[in-house]
Image: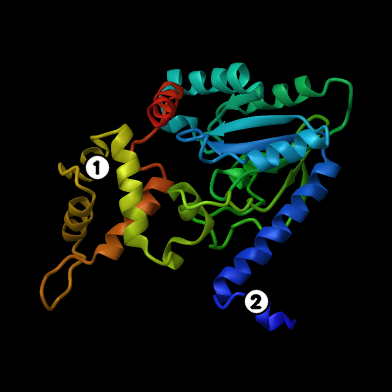
Amino acid sequence: MSASVIKPDNAVLWEVIIVRLASWRLVRELLEMCDVALEVVDIRDPISTRSRKLEALASNKGVPVVVVLNKADLIPLRVSESWRRYFEEYEGVRAVYISARKRLGTRILRKTVKDVVRDKSPLTVSVFGIPKVGKSTLINTLKGRHSASTSPYPGTPGYTRKSQLFKIGGNIYMIDTPGLVPPDGKDVESIIRSRPVDKLDNPVAVALKLINKVLKYNPYAFLQAYGIESRVPGEILAELARKRGWVYRKDGEPILHEAAKAVIRDYLDGKIVFYITPQQLEGSRSDSA
């Protein structure tokens, strides 16, 4: 059978498959090189932005994992603390909440790394995580200077593609890795973090899912972000488009795909107030049981 027979017709899908395989191959290599794996997640929804496959691989290789709950500046302190307790008490995983962007919590993170592996020096740490959870920002903060470039959205300049080793203080060395391909599935977090916003196949459909998710946990999110009172996803997009002047000249209809991309970008940037608590997570599990 020729290669052309088994190659997917969709060139983008074929590229995604190759990138995913290359990413996991690199992850395995990095786990062989490190003493501690830092898994960076978005604290607003840490369960959807973690990688259980990474955690299983690390466990199989005997590498301890520290969950780094990043973007803690976007949620109340009590919620940050509740997520730390959740991971440590319920999941049995060490966890630290930080704001890499605001340089908060990094001292505790360094101390935790040393506590996890006390009998070895120097230590090598690998940084893992799905795209756009703040891996490069964390590296930059720990280093104290911006020599690893960062950018707001996946697939744009600064999206980390090569591994680099940096000394970050004391006897701790850190490896910056490419963002992991999000878990297989069609959840909205995986979709918005795996491709550049401008390359999403259907940004309107994705934004509608995202709006529904946000409204479930914060009914006032779009009133706070945009001054839009409606809680109907389609109406929110239409009103945002009109507010921004994104309308077709011919008939004045709103350009929904522009509004959709704006919502996705604002969500990734933390401009839309949203977070899930461990208690809400347990409630959702009970409802679906």
Q: Amino acid at mark 2?
A: Lys
Name the residue tied to disc 2. 7
Of residues 47 and 257, the one nearer the viewer is 47
Locate residue 171: give its quadrant: top right
Q: Residue at x 70, y 50 (%)?
A: 177
Name the residue tied to disc 1. 222
> Considering only vertical position in the picture, is 205 above or below 269?
below
Q: What separation in Å lies between label 2 and label 1 (alpha carbons)?
A: 43 Å
Horizontal side of 210 relative to 90 (left or right) equals: left
- Is residue 163 among the parts visible in the rendering? no
Q: Say which quadrant the N terminus sits in.
A: bottom right
Give the crowd class for mark 1: few <14, some 14-19, many >=20 residues within 10 Å.
Answer: many
| Mark 2 or mark 1, whichever is nearer to me | 2
Q: Which mark is residue 106?
A: none
Residue 258, position as x, y percentages in the image: 29, 64
- Is residue 216 among the parts visible in the rendering? yes
Residue 15, position as x, y percentages in the image: 62, 70
Locate residue 274: give its quadrant: top left
Give the crowd class for mark 2: few <14, some 14-19, many >=20 residues within 10 Å.
Answer: few
Of residues 167 and 255, the one nearer the viewer is 255
Q: Amino acid at mark 1?
A: Phe
